[in-house]
Image (tube, rainbow, N blue to C red):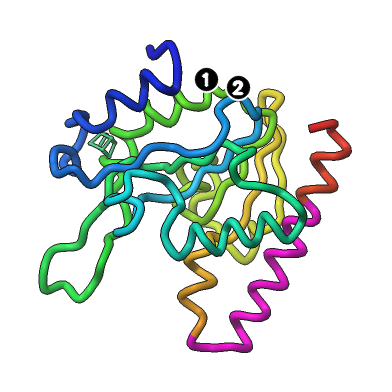
Amino acid sequence: MFQSIAELNTAIPSCRGCSLGGVNLYCLARGNPASKKMVIAEAPGKVEARQHKVLVGPAGILFDKIWASVGWDTNDWFLTNTLHCEPVAPKGSGKENLLPLEEQKKACRYLLDEEIRLVEPKVIVLLGKVAVGSILPALKNEPMRNLRGKSFDFGGILYYVLYHPSFILRSSFEPKKELELKMEIWQDVLNLERLMKERGI
Ligand code: SF4
């Protein structure tokens, strides 16, 4: 067990808990560990893994804007990932990243559990299917379309599901769909704001 987020962060660069360790493509959480408000995303992409910080690439920039649309600052939240190292796709596969494997998520789960224990969040926002499947495994086969904007109360924590911003970025070649998704996520964030207010978070 770690005594602080700072101590946990010192362990990540040298972690060899799964096959992704040891190549210096890791990321650390960002934001405020004392905020009681947490976001769990998926796995680091290229930018995150090289800057060693969660949600700082194109998806992170969009996420900052989504938060700002309701007057929130992502620095006032604690932002982390399901997986702390980049699941790089093999050369020649035509892909940049792979979806995290079950064994990788399982191996990295102790770090996420420690982050949750240390932060003691009152609200946890789950960004995308990987985060939902890891934290709420009973829902892992549900389509995101059915889960987005849904809230769940367990153990005194409000869990809330949102699309991952990278999903919106991937739809940018279809302007109509992109606009629709942006409207949906904005409505979902407004709903989250209302739920948090009701609970005094
Ligand atoms: S993904 Fe997690 S468990 Fe695997 S090496 Fe990185 S920090 Fe360790």
Q: Is residue 99 rendered to the left or right of residue 60?
A: left
Q: Residue at x 85, y 47 (%)?
A: 194
Q: Is residue 197 magenta?
A: no
Above or below residue 141? Residue 26 is: above
Q: Is residue 80 rendered to the left or right of residue 111?
A: right
Above or below residue 119? Residue 198 is: below
Q: Residue at x 80, y 40 (%)?
A: 196
Q: 106 or 23: which is nearer to us? A: 23
Question: Which range is magenta?
Answer: 173-191
Majority secondary structure in the magenta region = helix
Picture coordinates of residue 125, whole percent (x, y): 62, 44
Picture coordinates of residue 109, whole percent (x, y): 38, 32
Q: Is residue 30 rendered to the left or right of residue 53?
A: right
Q: Is residue 8 rendered to the left or right of residue 96?
A: right
Picture coordinates of residue 87, whole percent (x, y): 25, 53
Q: Residue at x 31, y 45 (%)?
A: 102
- Residue 132: which disc? none
Q: State which quarter of the image contains the N terminus.
A: top left
Tell me if label 2 and label 1 are in contact, CB under 8 Å.
yes
Give amino acid for label 1.
Arg
- Find disc 2 in the rendering and name its residue: 120
Q: Residue at x 36, y 18 (%)?
A: 7
Above or below residue 54? Residue 171 is: below
Q: 61 or 161: which is nearer to us? A: 61
- Find disc 1 in the rendering and name its residue: 117
